[in-house]
Image (cartoon, rainbow, N blue to C red):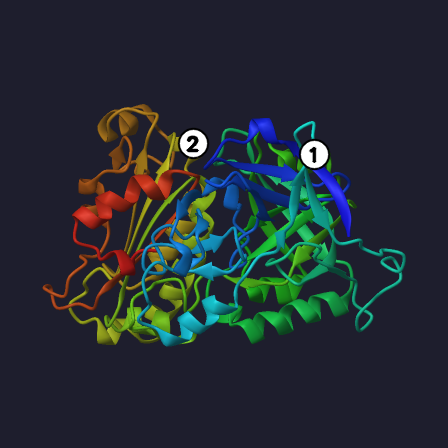
Amino acid sequence: MRDVKVADARNLQTGEMKKVCIPGSDQELLLTRGQDGRILAIDNRCPHKRASLHKGDIEDLGEHLGGLSVKCPKHRKKYAGGLFVSFNDGRCRTQRPLCDEGKEKKIKKWSVGTYETRVDSSGAVYVQLPIVDRSDSDSSSESSCAVANDVGQGGPSKWLDCVLEEVSARPDSAGDVFVYRFAFKSESSKSRFLNLAEESGCNHTAWHVWLRLGDVEREYTPISDMREVAASGSMLLLIRLYSDGQMSSKLRAARPGTSAFLSIPIPTVDANTWTSPAQIANRDLWHKVAEGKLRLGMVCAGTGVTPCVQLLAFVVEALRKNGSASNAKRTCLCGLLTSNMQTARTLMFDELRLLVSRAPASTVLVRHTLTAEGSPASVAKRSRSSREDVCNFSGRISRDMLAATLPAPSLGDGGGPCLVMVTGPPGFAEHCMPLLLALGHPQEMIA
């Protein structure tokens, strides 16, 4: 073991959390100080979907539930009130029992690393870390496929070698959103990716990947589907660049030919997405929506539109196969409300309009609100482009907008229950959740 200095104890108050980086690596730890004065340290990544735990809330659940814990910021409303990670033993827990025994068993297997700490006489905080031997790291391989092991805990277990092929600006942005094409470096890498996609069910549901450039990694939803990946050996990532972002800095410096790593594919929608006890397999979900036995509502902001486009594509494909006959009443089975700042920055508007045009009439509804422009009438008057109809609403997402766009939550209209997914920047889900609950959407049906 080795002692690594990570913080000053005087800067960590009781009940506070502090993210620290291990010098010389990309590993992040999360520190907190308990009521007894002890400083506790765990890995900073949720073992489920790699969310940064330091963005969550700290709570003391009592000794029987692991004591001092952090609530995952990505699962605040799921898993019967949130997914908690204990600072004492690193294990994941929920405050209340789940209805699904399979989920209970899965959560019991999830954990993050915990680390011993000490504070010296000067107030410096040290954590004990294992000594890692990397002497053979450049020579290892698996099945002639370039694969890098993940040094963190809870993330994708394998990374596949890839290269940046091209970069293009999105015309539906303010010059801050780009499309990056990353290609696998070998046919064996592509084959491994596609095989793992089939094994994990990503061929039948929305999926995402992690991108690693240098020592920085971030999660993105491709705008390519698996068929395009299989045909081209590459995928397109829609990415917004920020002035102060670590990954944004890496991407600005990247040029065609820059080496990178893509993770194995990860299902975005799986058996744990909604906590309702009535779960169905991924490949059946879209057919259930097409048949009217389930309905789907989606709310997104900014680049959060990408998983919604993926989901909508599956719904439309199922509707075209068998939805028109079973949905005789032509009721709305899938509704999407997007939030963007301006008409010219309504991301993936054309792709969404094409999907709606391919669906049977009245079965899919997509609406947009603009937060930085005037009323819908004034926007349409000013705009002479093909996007005059882009603005249905103006202002932040409201209860009335959701009611006018999403399928109803209850069974009173004769349709199936409505599953809702919310995707967007930090704080967006927190804004939408009380509005959805006020409309009668059960919390266990909202992800």
Q: Can see residue 243?
A: no
Q: Badge 1: how crowded within 10 Å, few (<14), some, or many (20+)?
A: few
Q: Do the residues labelled 2 and 1 touch (CB within 8 Å)?
A: no
Q: In this view, does 363 lie to the left or right of 305?
A: left
Q: Where, by quadrant of the figure, is residue 263 drawn? A: bottom right
Q: Can see residue 255?
A: yes
Q: Which residue shows up at 11% across the image and 64% down it?
A: 413
Residue type beneath disc 1 = Asp
Give whichever of 331, 324 is nearer the camera.
331
Q: Earlier in the sequence, mark 2 or mark 1?
A: 1
Image coords of residue 75 (percent x, y)? 41, 53
Q: Is residue 66 left or right of residue 178?
A: left
**Total marks drawn?**
2
Residue occupying the far left of the picture:
412
Q: In this view, does 86 lie above or below 371?
A: below
Q: Name the residue under label 2.
A: 344
